[in-house]
Amino acid sequence: MATIGVLGLQGAVEEHLKSIMLAGHEGTVIKLPRQLDEVDALIIPGGESTAIRKLMDHYGFIEKIQAFSALKKPIFGTCAGMVLLAERLSGTEDRHLGVMDITVQRNAFGRQKESFEAELSIEGLLNPFPAVFIRAPYIEQAGSEVEVLARYEDKIVMAKQDHLLVCSFHPELTEDPGVLLIFLEMVEQSVSAPF
Ligand code: GLN
């Protein structure tokens, strides 16, 4: 069975592990770059992207995750994880992993909407998904290889590019496994046909 690593530097790490286990898969916390050699896929959780970035630099994760992505191993970035995967961040020259062809606007839903829940219609899911947004980013611009999977009020909040999946919200905070199952399907495909 495929093993899913959850980057365990900061943020909603335990919640992701719990949902992976509830979905019947094996999850493991990644605290050091070399542990990436032992997993088939990676989840970069929500939290605070600047804090996660500092810790990534400290432990030497940037190049290791970029190499993991170059091997086409599935990576799922939720919320801050989406910010970290983006090639471009709106209004700044900064970027972190820079592996997905998207421009992301951080904390993008305004003060009055710092945190909210919305029923989203998601490509590939039959039922609306209860999405929890917490100081969420959205995708301002997506490259031609990027498939848009969901929008909220016209803003792109979930997308896929090849082996990369991102969403603005926190799927691990609700009981509906739908979004995780989309990722697990990508993982299954990559494990059975790695290239
Ligand atoms: N606003 C945060 C950031 O840019 C993300 C928030 C979250 O992950 N819930 O890092």
Image: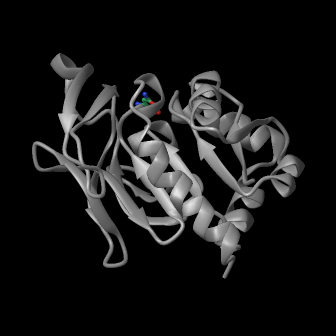
Would you place residue 15 above or below residue 69 in this image? above
- Horizontal and vertical percent for residue 95? 52, 54
Residue situated furthest right in the rendering: 34
- Horizontal and vertical percent for residue 119? 19, 32
- Horizontal and vertical percent for residue 134? 35, 24
- Left or right: where does residue 184 sit relative to residue 168? right
Q: Which of 95 and 161 lies nearest the eye of the viewer?
A: 161
Q: Residue at x 40, y 63 (%)?
A: 160
The mark tally for this picture is: 0
Residue situated furthest left in the rendering: 153
Q: Which of 151 and 92 lies nearest the eye of the viewer?
A: 151
- Left or right: where does residue 182 sit relative to residue 104? right
Can residue 48 be seen at all in this image of the molecule? yes
- Horizontal and vertical percent for residue 5? 72, 44
Q: Residue at x 54, y 67 (%)?
A: 163
Would you place residue 20 above or below residue 157 in this image? above
- Left or right: where does residue 165 sit relative to residue 34? left
Q: Residue at x 37, y 62 (%)?
A: 102
| Quarter of the rendered image showing ligand 1 | top left
Q: Which of 175 and 77 lies nearest the eye of the viewer?
A: 175
Residue situated furthest bottom in the rendering: 195
Q: Residue at x 63, y 34 (%)?
A: 52
**Quadrant in the rendering for residue 70:** bottom right
